[in-house]
Image (cartoon, helix red, strand yellow):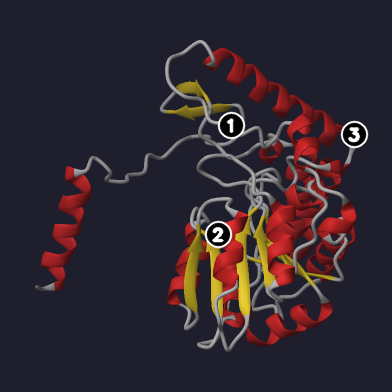
Amino acid sequence: MSWQHRIELALAERQAADALRSRLPVTLGAGRWLSREGRRWLNFSSNDYLGLSQHPAIVKAWQQGADRYGVGSGGSGHVSGYSEAHRALEEQLAGWLGYPRALLFISGFAANQAVIAALAGKEDRIVADRLSHASLLEAASLSPAQLRRFQHNDSRHLDDLLAKPLSGQQLVVTEGIFSMDGDSAPLAEVYQAARAAGALLLVDDAHGIGALGEEGRGSCYAQQVRPDLLIVTFGKAFGVSGAAVLCSEALADYLLQFARHLIYSTAMPPAQAVALSAALAVIRSDEGQQRRETLAGHIADFRRGMSHYPGELTDSGSADPTADRRRQRPRAAAGGASA
């Protein structure tokens, strides 16, 4: 089969399944309203959870950052692309989330791929929730380590897989809030399973960070769990883009040496880092708390409205502060909160 035939066949199969992806250019795709060709629609498709992509202070911060640093970083952070703005943001993130170090990445996809690729060896095992994000499962599949998937949010199945004999090390992978269904992981139970097996725990909290927990510290803080590797992204509640890995000093030093996505990519623009610092300030402020409460209120209103329609509405109160409290575990059991 030629390349052309293979490509055409794959596209035809996708078309037949009514699953062919396409893109439509919009005038504005973030914020409350989506506008295109002179029309506008109430926007339920954006992941700008707190509406910060249009926040005047954050927009102004990016403009001021561009005035000071220009529009690009000019290189990898290992060469000339690591600026004072990057360092300041990393220090702010580490202090906010209670970790020794934070490392910036250009996207959450890149961060997840980089961490797994740098850590996983052929003698190792990655045990991932089967509904983990594509970036996590793809990285695990492409790594030399064996990949085992536990049933969604099933800590007993996780225990069983971790107990199987292995000569190498184990990495447990899950999300704080799962992007498709909107439900939360039982992080305290997952943490305990990982600790009992001597495994590292990686939590991707792309959809929880900024949107829940005290000062928007996310799923892990809300459930009083501190994973070895916490991945936070900036394209959702932060309203910008990019990502960071929160970890120990030793893990940060290791990733700086072996995370190829970090070493061989141009660093995010310093102006973006300035904007992200401004977004973090809003998220931690009283205004940020008000926006989180508004989000939770909108979710509650939507669920009440949908309760009158036929069909099943799944339990996914991920941005509901009451649900956060129900999911919390005693601090001693979960290894302490990332304060």
- Going by the picture, which residue comes out furthest to the top? 308
Given contact means CB atoms under 8 Å apart, are the residues at marks 2 and 3 in contact? no
Considering only vertical position in the picture, is 301 above or below 242?
above
Which element is circle 3 on? helix
**In the rendered image, which quarter contains the N terminus?**
bottom left
Which kind of residue does numbered mark 3 sit on?
Answer: Asp
How far from the left and from the top, in percent, is residue 142?
A: 44, 76
Considering only vertical position in the picture, is 113 above or below 131?
below
Earlier-in-chain disc, 3 versus 1: 3
Earlier-in-chain disc, 2 versus 3: 2
Residue under the point 60% across and 73% down: 163
Label number found at residue 286: 3
Between 277 and 171, the one lying in front of the other is 171
Q: Quadrant of residue 226?
A: bottom right
Which kind of residue does numbered mark 1 sit on?
Answer: Asp
Given contact means CB atoms under 8 Å apart, are the residues at marks 3 and 1 in contact? no
Q: Report which residue position mark 2 lands on.
A: 157
Residue under the point 53% across and 34% down: 28
Between 119 and 2, the one lying in front of the other is 119
Given contact means CB atoms under 8 Å apart, are the residues at marks 1 and 2 in contact? no
Residue under the point 58% across and 39% down: 182
